[in-house]
Image (tube, helix red, strand yellow):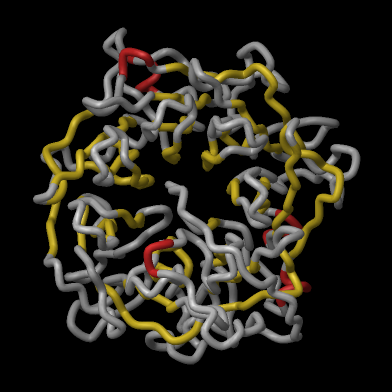
């Protein structure tokens, strides 16, 4: 899930706090409108601070189970501020349709300035949505427009074409300029097997004027994650997908499509210097080695399956790093890190899930993007699947275990207490919400409190993340239904 760097405006802090399901941040002064050229990636209200969107696609909304919602917490000079928040569902004014059982609004979440007004917009998948034209579970991608007062209004961007297409299933949505025309394009998976590229620019009615491209793969893949970024440095975003072939659950591979002025080029399957496929279920892109090219980071959290006979055994999971270069991914220089790598906390054990939901951003402000990864299956103190999270350092030579740091709910200073099946670290996200050049770490534990789910936020220093000043929030803070919501199932990409 790619987090591309944007040029941020400075602005007023969001300070308004209102109780209820929808809390809007304060408006800007008259005439204080951000420049469209700034193109903020995840600043919904244009105040210069990155914001956070947290998905709960299985949450109950107005009595409708698994209708789903997305909670937004706004950034500020002191970081993420839970007093300035919104909860958006299909019952929110301006959002397409209404909350219904099994819609799963929030199945995938992204951000981009689709209408080029200088404010980032929230892009949300509802993979279980039915449509009049397509039938049951065609799926929907919806935009909620950003503005000086936060998120409001919206439009449908795309429905699936046919019954059970389930457009925008989990993590199967990303946004980038894949044809270099300066407008954001929506890349989404349809029917689990094909890429659908909807090319901007987008109008306020949700219509796209650039046409569509369908990318098929003759291997009958099942997509697991998508990310966009400029891997070859040509100024056009590329697309990277994590997938497995056909019905073979464990036969994983990473595929790269170069962006061109005509759209996405033919696929390249990433194969390292030993002839092994680079594998993974989770993706993000960023400049880990500081050379100006976006690098590919792939988390391979599944271990011990048949496909491991054809690739080095990722006991407990691993994170793969593939540097970018002028000709695209430099797969011959791939690096793998796991919990047995020097400097990484813990030890590699079967089913730890190391490599879950990787995120890439500069945590310590040294100019190299770092990588967060969950370890949701981590056991300790007699607790099964209590979970943890680790941040790996970037460096001139790429990803390294040296200087890695880890946190869990038993770490001194972290709110709460570790419990079995919390799955702390099932999801992770790095976001610079106070605009100090160092990204904070956000961790989701969808299993917390009998699957109610909670989110933790860790501040960062020049030494990396710190438990000091960390805080947590859940349904009580948001004013939502806790039961089986699995809050923290995903974050904005």
Q: How many marks?
A: 0
Q: Is residue 51 visible to the viewer in this orientation of the structure? A: no
The residue at the far right in this view is 412
Residue 16, position in %: x, y? Answer: 73, 81
The residue at the far front in this view is 31
Horizontal arrangement in the rendering, residue 303 relative to residue 296 (left or right)? right
Picture quadrant where residue 305 is located: top left
Residue 108, position in %: x, y? Answer: 43, 61
Please say if 331 is above or below 53.
above
Picture quadrant where residue 144 is located: bottom left
Please say if 216 is above or below 347.
below
Residue 351, position in %: x, y? Answer: 59, 29
Residue at horizontal 63 percent and vertical 63 percent from the top: 487
Please say if 348 is above or below 427.
above
Q: Is residue 50 visible to the viewer in this orientation of the structure? A: yes
Residue at horizontal 64 percent and vertical 56 percent from the top: 433
Return the residue nearer the eye: 402 or 50.
50
Residue at horizontal 19 percent and vertical 30 percent from the top: 268
Return the residue nearer the eye: 402 or 481.
402
């Amino acid at each position: 899930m790619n987090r591309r760097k944007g040029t941020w405006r400075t602005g007023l802090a969001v300070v308004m706090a209102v109780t209820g399901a929808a809390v809007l941040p304060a408006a800007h002064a008259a005439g204080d409108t951000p420049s469209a050229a700034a193109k903020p990636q995840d600043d919904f209200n244009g105040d210069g601070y990155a914001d956070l969107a947290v998905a709960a696609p299985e949450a109950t909304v107005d009595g409708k189970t698994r209708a789903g919602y997305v909670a937004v917490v706004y950034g500020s000079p002191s970081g993420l501020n839970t007093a300035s928040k919104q909860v958006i569902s299909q019952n929110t004014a301006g959002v397409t349709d209404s909350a219904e059982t099994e819609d799963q609004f929030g199945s995938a979440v992204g951000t981009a300035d689709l209408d080029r007004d200088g404010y980032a917009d929230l892009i949300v998948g509802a993979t279980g949505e039915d449509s009049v034209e397509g039938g049951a579970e065609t799926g929907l991608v919806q935009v909620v427009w950003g503005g000086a007062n936060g998120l409001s209004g919206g439009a449908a961007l795309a429905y699936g074409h046919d019954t059970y297409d389930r457009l925008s299933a989990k993590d199967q949505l990303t946004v980038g300029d894949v044809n270099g025309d300066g407008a954001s394009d929506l890349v989404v998976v349809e029917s689990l097997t094909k890429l659908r590229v909807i090319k901007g620019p987008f109008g306020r009615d949700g219509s796209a004027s650039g046409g569509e491209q369908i990318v098929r793969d003759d291997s009958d893949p099942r997509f697991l994650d998508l990310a966009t970024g400029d891997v070859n440095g040509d100024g056009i975003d590329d697309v990277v997908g994590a997938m497995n072939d056909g019905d073979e659950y464990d036969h994983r591979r990473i595929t790269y499509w170069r962006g061109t002025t005509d759209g996405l080029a033919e696929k390249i399957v990433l194969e390292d210097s030993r002839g092994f496929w680079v594998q993974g279920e989770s993706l993000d892109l960023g400049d880990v080695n500081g050379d100006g090219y976006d690098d590919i980071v792939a988390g391979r959290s599944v271990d011990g399956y048949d496909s491991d006979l054809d690739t080095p055994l990722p006991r407990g999971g691993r994170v793969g790093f593939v540097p970018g270069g002028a000709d695209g991914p430099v797969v011959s220089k791939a690096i793998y890190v796991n919990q047995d790598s020097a400097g990484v906390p813990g030890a590699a054990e079967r089913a730890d899930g190391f490599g879950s939901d990787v995120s890439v951003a500069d945590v310590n402000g040294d100019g190299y993007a770092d990588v967060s990864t969950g370890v949701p299956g981590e056991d300790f103190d007699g607790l099964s699947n209590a979970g943890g999270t680790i941040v790996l350092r970037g460096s001139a030579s790429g990803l390294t275990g040296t200087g890695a740091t880890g946190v869990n709910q038993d770490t001194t200073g972290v709110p709460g207490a570790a419990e079995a099946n919390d799955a702390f670290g099932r999801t992770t996200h790095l976001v610079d919400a106070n605009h100090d050049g160092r990204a904070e770490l956000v961790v989701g534990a969808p299993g917390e409190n009998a699957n109610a789910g909670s989110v933790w936020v860790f501040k960062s220093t020049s030494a990396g993340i710190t438990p000091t000043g960390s805080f947590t929030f859940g349904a009580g803070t948001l004013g939502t239904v806790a039961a089986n919501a699995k809050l923290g199932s995903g974050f904005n990409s």
